[in-house]
Image: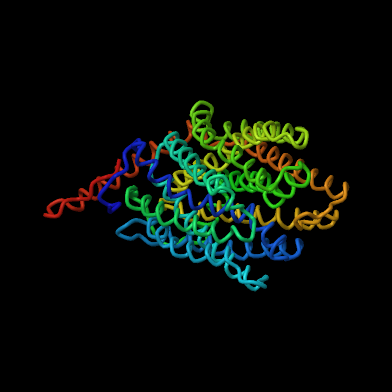
Amino acid sequence: MSHAATAAPARLPLPRVWAFATGSIPVTMLLLVLGTYITPFYAGTVGIKLAVLGATLSSLRLIDVGFDFLLGWLMDRFETPFGRFKPWFVLALPVFCLGVFKLLNPPEGAGLEHLVPWLLVCYVAYSLLGLSHAAWAANLASDYHERSRIFGWTQGIAVIGSVSLLLAPVLSGGAIKPGAAESMPKLAIILIVVALVTVPINALFTPERVVRGTKQDGASFKDLLAIFTTGSMSRLILADLLLTLGANSTGPMYVFFFHTAKGFEISEVSYLLIPYIGAGILGAPAWAHVAARFGKHRALQIACVGYAITQAILMAIPAGLLAATAVGMFFVGFSASAFIPMMRSMVADVTDELRLETGKERAGVLYSLVILVQKFGTSVTAIIVLPILQYVGFDPKPHAANTPEAIFGLQMCYLFAPIIFVLIGSLVFFGYKLTPERHAEISAALKAKEGASFAAAEEAFAGSAEPPPKPVT
């Protein structure tokens, strides 16, 4: 379907929203594997030292961030008959399949020489999928609240893939244990099959909205400066970094914390991620309703406070209580499920603000900054957390006997890092000016501007046999 032939309706039909949201499933599954299973697999099984692994993961993320900005710039610059974002999304499919297969199938005796190139390929696949999908979602709707709905459903459906991956040990009768050496190739096959199904569904059944009256040339230095100096975007970048640091600081030590400090078996550790991630099925759409009532920035502040409270309660639950811990994980995940959809929806609103000010569509570059911040944030957590664990004497090897001091250091890292970062992130939104009322003013101004562009086009075509282009509503 050509995006030029179809104008996105004011409210996208729910089946089409679901079709679009399926494209986020392989992205979320890849993040789950990279953020939770790669560290214990390559440190505990492959045998790379924690400090070396942490430095490697961080360095690769920082190297990769330049690609995100280049990709966003290219998306904003080039238009194709199939849209600006869809071709990049489809291009990600072979990169994803190759990177996942090689990363999760290391040959015997593999080390950094295998991890580095194939992890970079996976990061590139994540950038292609995540950036194009997020910018495409912003393109689907121009309404403030409709964007909350689309991003909320996208996040909620993405959770289904992660929960299915976490249920793999149960569904396979114990044949798959995420993080175990013999199970990683099986996980690779699962991710590849899911991508081969969901990416075509997304691409075939979702249009792109044509935005009239905007320029698609490359970004000048002045344009880039406008992005960084826009009050709304600078706040979003800072807040996104802090929320990323908070929510992702637990990832590298998740398996260690619940296995060693909380006393759960490895299989139970995997199960505990199910209520945490699964909470997003209810949480993401629910936070969209909260945003419709109070505004997106207020919804995020409420979620941040809820995250800090529920994270503290989770830490206080005695070790070994699986049911109580699962409930605690659900409420932490429910709070955290607001972070990504609300932030990305707010970035979409900033694209309108900049389009009104500059006359240029910069969704690709703006979302590249979001991906860049997320990668930088997760790289910083790896740099900080893993060396600290090694410093306090924590041993990541299976069945290792850790000292009480090492376990206590692990617990303190798991408790305080996310709470501090998330609460500071909530403070950034005091004084945030891109409210629903302000966005309504921006939308009205854009419609008037695009109407003027259409009127000019009609005048230019006056007396010509070729009809003028129709405006997009």
x and y, in percent, of residue 447 in the image: 34, 40
Residue at image coords 87%, 50%: 403
As drawn, the residue found furthest toward the top would be 293
x and y, in percent, of residue 229 in the image: 57, 50
Residue at image coords 58%, 63%: 104
x and y, in percent, of residue 332 in the image: 65, 35
43 sits to left or right of 452: right
Colour scheme employed for the rendering of this structure = rainbow
**In which quadrant of the rendered image does the C terminus lie?**
top left
Q: Give above or below for 60 relative to 16.
A: below
Residue at image coords 69%, 32%: 310
Residue at image coords 60%, 68%: 106
Q: Give above or below for 302 relative to 63.
A: above
As drawn, the residue found furthest toward the front would be 173
The foreground one among 263 and 1 is: 263
288 sits to left or right of 82: right
The foreground one among 56 and 330 is: 330
10 sits to left or right of 148: left
Q: Give above or below for 193 relative to 417.
A: below
Count of all numbered marks drawn on residues in the image: 0
x and y, in percent, of residue 201 in the image: 36, 50
- Quarter of the image for residue 400 reads bottom right
The foreground one among 46 and 235 is: 46
Q: Give above or below for 409 relative to 301.
A: below
The foreground one among 213 and 96 is: 96
